[in-house]
Image (tube, rainbow, N blue to C red):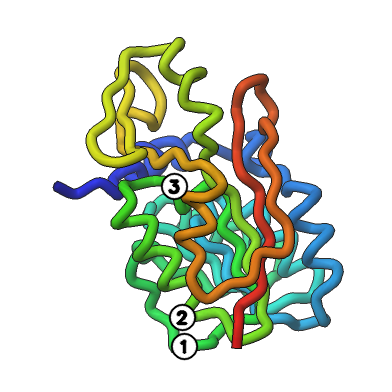
Amino acid sequence: MTTDTAHRYWNAEWQKSDGSSPWAIPEPWVMDHASTLPSGARILDLGAGIGRHALALAEAGHRVTALDAAEAAVAAIAAAAFAKGLTIETVEAPMTDLPFADASFDHVLAWNVIYHGDEAVVRRALSEVARVTRPGGTFLATMLSARRLPVEQARAPGREISRNTWVFEGPGDKVHPHYFCTAPDLLSLLWGFEVLTLFDRPHEKPGSWHWHLLAERLG
């Protein structure tokens, strides 16, 4: 069973999004960490959406590659980069098979993307992130927290299709498989990384619990 299918939903969403979308606003934590990186750092924005971080990171002077599995996302970033006179490499590919050499990046960002699939997909994606991050490089990401699961269950009927992996009825991308994890589950998946920061907090909506992590690639 193929479980990394959420990009089909997001491809349609990205076709409707523009600069006024909430998805066009960079996250402060992302930019705060980027400010600690050397100028010209090689950054992979994994699951880049319409490019809110890729564009801001390029404007900050970094060498950015924006990857997404949705065709509309890649097209939106390319158009926005051209309009702003920015150089951003855009790549349409799945997060489970990154078309880059080992240790290609100083920093990998994966904001609200890795959890779109079952545990096998998550493990494969994190393995790929570890492969393309240089030793000493950093990884900043969010993951769905198990604390969010009761919130989703109260909103719509759902079922667990495999360990920690749920689908829910109704509108939104959660008709596609999503992986919800505890801290021990998450730490067990981060082979090759030393976790520097890990905290659980809602995003913009009450109950929207996500793990937020910053990790360093081990040598």
- Residues 79 and 210: in front is 210
User: Given the image, on which type of amino acid does mark 2 rest?
Assistant: Arg
- At x 33%, y 38%, the residue is 165
- At x 44%, y 12%, the residue is 155
> Which residue is labeled 2 in the image?
131
User: Given the image, on which type of amino acid does mark 3 rest?
Assistant: Tyr
Q: Is residue 60 left or right of residue 7?
A: right
Give the image location of residue 166, x and y in percent: 33, 32
The C terminus, quarter of image: bottom right
- Residues 163 and 114: in front is 163
Assess whether mark 1 and mark 2 are in contact (beta carbons under 8 angstroms).
yes
- Which of disc 3 and disc 1 is earlier in sequence? 1
Dot 3 surroundings within 10 Å: few (below 14), some, or many (20 or more)?
many
Q: Is residue 121 left or right of residue 40?
A: left
> Which residue is labeled 1 in the image?
102
- Which of disc 1 and disc 2 is earlier in sequence? 1
Give the image location of residue 143, x and y in percent: 54, 46
In the rendered view, would you say 110 is above or below 104? above
Give the image location of residue 216, x and y in percent: 66, 73
Q: Secondary structure at mark 2?
A: helix
In the rendered view, would you say 7 is above or below 135? above
Dot 1 surroundings within 10 Å: few (below 14), some, or many (20 or more)?
some
Res 185 label: none
Q: CA distance from mark 3 to mark 2?
A: 18 Å
Q: CA distance from mark 1 to mark 3?
A: 23 Å
- Residues 129 and 120: in front is 120
Give the image location of residue 23, x and y in percent: 62, 40
